[in-house]
Image (cartoon, grey):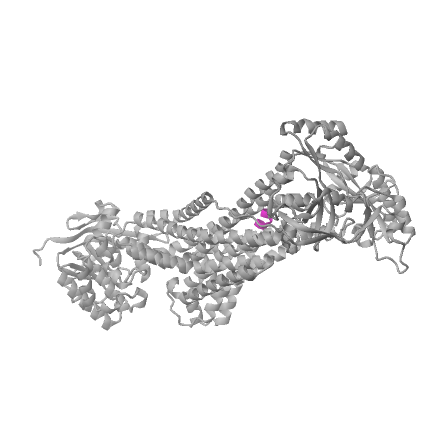
Amino acid sequence: MTRAGLQALLSHWWRHPGQLVMLLAGLMLATALWSGVQAINAEARAAYAQAAGRVDAGARARIVPRAGERLDEAQYVALRRAGWPVSPVVEAHLTAGGATVRLIGIDPITTPSDLIPRAFSGTDSAETLRRFLLPPHLVFAAPDVAAALAEATGAEVRAADDLAPGTAVADVGFVQRLGGAEGLLDRLIVTDAPRALAPPPLETIAPGLVLQPAAPRADLARLTASFHLNLSAFGLLAFAVGLFIAHGAVGLAFEARRGMFRTLRALGLPLWHLMLLIALELALMALVAGAAGMVAGLLIAGALLPDVAASLKGLYGAEVPGTLTLRAQTWVAGMAAALAGAGLAGAGALWQLARLPVLAPAMPRAWARASAHRRALEATGGLALLVAAAALARFGSGLMAGFALMAALLLGAALILPPLLDLCLRLAGRAARGPLSQWFWADARQGLPGLSLAMMALLLALAANIGVGTMVESFRRAFTGWLDQRLAAELYVRARDDAEAERLRAFLAGRSEAVLPLWRVEATVAGVPSFVYGVEDHPTYRENWPLLDALPGVWDRLAAGEAALINEQLARRAGLSPGDTIEILPGWRLEVAGIYSDYGNPTGQVMVALAPFLAHFPDAPRLSHAVRVAPEDAPALARALIEEFGLPAENVVDQAALKRWSLSIFERTFAITAALNVLTLGVAGVAIVTSLAALSGQRLVQLAPVWAVGVERRRLARLELLRALALAALTAALALPLGLALAWVLLAIVNVEAFGWRLPMQLFPLDWLRLVALALLAAALAALWPALRLARMAPARLVQVFAAAR
Amino acid sequence: MENKPALLSARNIRRAFTSAGARLEVLRGVDLSLRHGESLALTGESGSGKSTLVHILAGLELPDAGEVEIEGTPLNRLSEAGRARLRRETIGIVFQQFNLIPSLDAGANIAFQARLAGRHDPDHVTRLAGRLGLAGHLHKYPEELSGGQQQRVAIGRALAARPALILADEPTGNLDEATADEVLALMLELVAEAGAALLMVTHSVRLAARLDRQLQLSRGRIFA
């Protein structure tokens, strides 16, 4: 019975390959985009986990020199002898095989075991330890640099897949020698709580060192969460668009197979068995489409990952490999998504089947009327979601509320699209005068349910494109304007040590208009990890700094040391406004005199006058400087600095290069969203094509009588094309306000919550026109084939409609 | 009646189909003619080619050989647009399954062809609807009407443009006997009032007897 039933059910797809393609394409595209994004996120998370678990992890407290230079090994020995549970770390950067390798030197005896590569603790750990400590030294390296490092150092290198890309771990003494830093260390990790017999305070043993508590800022997973959440939101949107297609295909197949269901039940197949068979059929399709979707998703992920890796490195300094690793959990999650998607797409049809009387009319009724009740429910649900979106916009807070608002807005708008289109078509029909035009609008109305899912997909894709496009373009304009203001200095120079910095300042004094310190220290201000900058009073700041809000006389009060400026991120996270007071150090409180925009920076910033800054942070590193010079003299001065001081090129950066770098990070970040946008639009295009193809067979029943009473096939074909264009145009017109609402949510809520800044929204009507034209073109292309087929259809085929009716 | 000129004449109509690789000759040289105002019943077994002949006479498909003329115009020399115009203006078709336009209500369905032909007369449509017993159903959509009501709408559509020729392909084949009698009587009455000629395909010898002439189609040929 099962075999015969399944054979009968599957025969439908054999006879209607268009519907089969539509269902498989929907599930495949949904799985592809979702699993592609998830594969990228999984890759990044794995990289963060590696980074977080290694020696440089900020999750542990550490001891560093107050002046920002290296500390002496003797200080480490003194601290150990005094009972401080510390372990030494030194770093060297080597060039191996064209890549820079970050070589971290550790002491395997004192380093906590959870910070040592897993490969260290093998079966023969004593032998491993001996080879690690003694020449030629055993080095553990990330797989991407292992071979090159072995060649460059002559050491025995073992690949360790739990190390972050581009890093390696070796014995501290070996790294000191390689880096030319014998007797010096970069930092000491506090490996444990101080023992019961409290050791003497740090100041008494090593006065030049400071204890830094565990730094939450190094938690890459937290810093980048909003970036990945954004990617996930796009993946989810694409998944939803794909599900719309699959849902449409299942609904069409259900309508077309009503007669078959009745016959199967009349012939003795129990209802539960029939439902089981349909569920089995759906699961089979989900497995086939899911596997294809996974392959496509991994290809997409592979193509996008280099841009994602570049963005993450540029924005957060996070190292993520540019190539994809195939993970079992990605496959499992992708297939689960395909099965869940098929379940969601088919749940409604199964529910209807469960309630279908055994002698229900076999003839497929017009979708419009058959599902009128369901459509009314969907429209009510859509309105409820829009009300929920408005409530979230008014009362919600947090990033999740922002995404919930976006989801409610998009889903609500999609659900009320069919009734809105129906209303537009009804009004157009009323205004029409000729019989053919009246039939045209009435027919478009009647055919709407079959196309409404494709139109919903188009609405979502267009709205996402308009919304994200507006956000990105608004961001691009604000960002480039901000860069012009913020990067006012012609050169940015960084010395390698304090002595060199002093000589640099002396050198530049006679050759530039101004040398402005860019000196900063880390501090927690109002509970937010931040950088505090000491700035000179100079027109560069007064004339260019991008202030969003300020008290009167802001620059004079800053220069007098009475007030501070803070960036937008700190203001929003700590809820600060001009006039509020912040505590930078215990006892050092300043009024907030202004707030400035600071795009592209995930942390808080405070600007104070240079003199009080140096008074409170006498050991702050004084290495970086902004140099004002006539723009035409900047290249020569840069060359002179490199020649005179032997500075590496990356330590002397001109304004244009810095802008180029910043903009390239920006472009690569949004290249990902642009790619996902295009893919989503492509999915919507596929939805229209598959819907029209699946419906074209059923359209003959509507078109043949009109042809029979004297309307030529060519004219009918033109009207078919026009119908698709009219629906796409109406959908595009409704997508515009939705897209702008989406842009507002992205700019005013999601960006503020995710990144801490709000951008002014700008409108780009030419982009909308281009998108609408694209939507019309997609609809025309999608309708072209069925229309051409109709225009060239043999009359005998049309006549068959009347014969088949019998 | 015999003195009236021929409205429809078909000479040596041949039509064959290929099905599963086998050639099936459905019409093997059919000749018939119909004068203005005349009614003709065409009977025959299932699969005898009756519907195919009606489709050819309506210009919905072309024969493999032979010629159909309506009011002296040979259909096979007309373009598709020409045949479409002829159908709009000269022919009313009634199908067994009604083939109404599902997106239009009953009133719009009745008026549709007349409006296409530029001969829409609202009073005529109202009168026709009244005669067909559809006055209270004009705003209903096809699926909201019974089979008999749908067929009345189809008859109204065929007559509203005042065509010279009505082609009815088993117009009562989908109705019960009582309704079939009622619908046929009404159709014959209205056709006669309009002065149109009627060619009706039917299985029923009883119904065929009510028309002026009867012909039988058997194995692709016409027998009187």
Camera-nearest residue between A230 and A524: A524
Count the labels in the image: 0
Residue A285 seen in this snapshot = no
Is the N terminus of chain B in the top left, top right, bottom left or bottom right quadrant? Answer: bottom left
From the top left corner, tell me how far across and down residue A791 is, in percent: 33, 47
In the image, the segment drawn in magenta is: A295-300
> Principal SS element in the magenta part?
helix
Camera-nearest residue between A466 and B173: A466
Q: Residue furthest right?
A: A81
Residue A432 seen in this snapshot = yes
From the top left corner, tell me how far across and down residue A219 is, in percent: 71, 52
A298 within the magenta span: yes
Identify whether A594 is placed above or below A387: above
Is the C terminus of chain B in the top left, top right, bottom left or bottom right quadrant? Answer: bottom left
Q: Quadrant of residue A643?
A: top right
Which residue is rendered at x = 49% and y = 57% of the image? A244
From the top left corner, tell me how far across and down residue A297 is, in percent: 58, 50
Camera-nearest residue between B198 and A514: A514
In this image, A33 relative to A86: left or right? Answer: left
From the top left corner, tell me how far across and down residue B43 is, in percent: 21, 62
Q: Residue furthest left?
A: B3
In this image, A122 relative to A522: left or right? Answer: right
A755 within the magenta span: no
In this image, A76 relative to A216: left or right? Answer: right
